[in-house]
Image (spheres, rainbow, N blue to C red):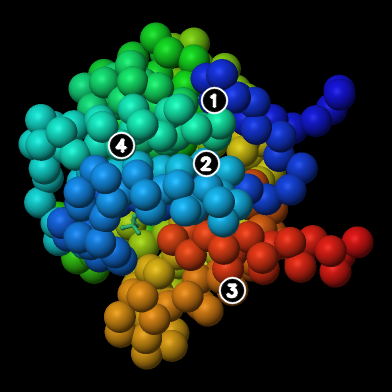
């Protein structure tokens, strides 16, 4: 059909006419939201398969915690965590995304079947741009201020929406200049990555500004600290209601893909919202 918006990710063409849910599988001992729950490859795969059953359209596999204050993990360790999981999930009929800042990890994940590179450092590393350009994978360019070790130390912006948008457009421009087609690129404002509560709220309100940039838009608010700050839910696992609300809010303001831990609840909430809109 002509005129349909799509996000091209390797052998997949995701049609963006309804919001899609990207299910999160962190193969880490220490992610802030679900650390250690799925650290063994077998457990991670079992969890991912249940997220697919619940209606996830994409599975995002990460092997390095990027929670505030975390140290970088060596690529070899990260790869050992994610490779078996990506390889197994690539047999399923939905795209697998590799959540990494490391070009060698991204390359190896693509080799075993990943279809999307989700780079929380926003393709600042030219080697990461090369990996994307040499593949046909989809890419997520996410905004982060600095790096996870220091990003929450008094983040400051003159105009958070303008600066985040400028960073994302620059990243997309560099990728396109290297040969990555426009419809392979998704942009993500990076909720919680070097942002105060006010910054996060401002960005979630300004999503239509990001939609106007003309790329697929991804939003990850699930279980994040700002939800705890708004609700006093200290334990990330207690932030389901807030996470679903944020996902619906984001989708209502034009997000094409929402990244979520609680996939069944998120899919159901989006279905009902869509039905009510007619
Ligand atoms: N958040 C986290 C990790 N990866 N990727 C994208 N594209 N967007 C996000 O908001 C994002 C991400 C951190 O959250 P987690 O520890 O729950 O995975």
Locate the N terminus and report the quarter of the image it occupies.
top right
Q: Which mark is residue 85?
A: 4
Instruction: Quickly name the residue at label 3.
Output: 245
Q: Disc 2 or disc 3, which is closer to the eye? A: 2
Q: Which mark is residue 9?
A: 1
> Which residue does the image show at 67% across and 50% down from the upper left?
19
The local secondary structure at tag 3 comes to helix
Of the two numbered discs 1 and 2 on the same chain, state the one appearing first in sequence: 1
Mark 3 touches mark 4? (CB < 8 Å): no
The local secondary structure at tag 2 comes to strand
Of the two numbered discs 2 and 4 on the same chain, state the one appearing first in sequence: 2
Q: Disc 2 or disc 4, which is closer to the eye? A: 4
Of the two numbered discs 3 and 4 on the same chain, state the one appearing first in sequence: 4
The local secondary structure at tag 4 comes to helix
Q: Residues within 10 Å of mark 2 (few under 14, many from 20)?
A: many
Q: Residues within 10 Å of mark 1 (few under 14, many from 20)?
A: many
Instruction: For marks 3 and 1, give the CA distance.
Output: 28 Å
The extreme right residue here reads: 278
Q: Is residue 247 visible?
A: no
Mark 2 touches mark 4? (CB < 8 Å): no
Q: Residues within 10 Å of mark 4 (few under 14, many from 20)?
A: many
Instruction: For marks 2 and 4, give the CA distance.
Output: 14 Å
Instruction: For marks 4 and 1, give the CA distance.
Output: 19 Å
Locate the C terminus and report the quarter of the image it occupies.
bottom right
């Amino acid at each position: 059909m002509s005129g349909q918006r799509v996000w091209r990710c390797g052998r997949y063409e995701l049609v963006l006419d309804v919001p899609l849910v990207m299910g999160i599988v962190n193969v880490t001992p220490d992610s802030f939201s679900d650390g250690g729950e799925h650290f063994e490859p077998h457990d991670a795969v079992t969890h991912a398969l249940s997220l697919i059953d619940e209606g996830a359209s994409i599975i995002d596999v990460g092997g390095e915690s990027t929670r505030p204050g975390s140290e970088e993990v060596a690529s070899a360790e990260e790869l050992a965590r994610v490779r078996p999981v990506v390889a197994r999930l690539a047999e399923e009929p939905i795209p697998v995304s590799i959540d990494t800042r490391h070009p060698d990890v991204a390359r190896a994940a693509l080799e075993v079947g990943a279809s999307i590179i989700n780079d929380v450092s926003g393709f600042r590393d030219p080697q990461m741009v090369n990996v994307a350009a040499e593949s046909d994978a989809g890419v997520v360019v996410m905004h982060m201020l600095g790096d996870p070790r220091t990003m929450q130390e008094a983040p400051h912006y003159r105009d958070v929406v303008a600066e985040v948008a400028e960073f994302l457009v620059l990243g997309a421009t560099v990728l396109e200049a290297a040969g990555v087609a426009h419809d392979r690129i998704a942009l993500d404002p990076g909720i919680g990555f070097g942002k105060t509560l006010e910054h996060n709220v401002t960005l979630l309100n300004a999503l239509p500004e990001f939609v106007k940039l003309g790329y697929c838009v991804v939003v990850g608010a699930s279980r994040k600290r700002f939800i705890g700050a708004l609700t006093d839910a200290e334990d990330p696992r207690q932030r389901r209601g807030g996470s679903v609300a944020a996902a619906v809010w984001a989708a209502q303001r034009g997000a094409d893909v929402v990244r979520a831990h609680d996939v069944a609840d998120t899919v159901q909430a989006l279905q009902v919202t869509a039905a009510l809109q007619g």
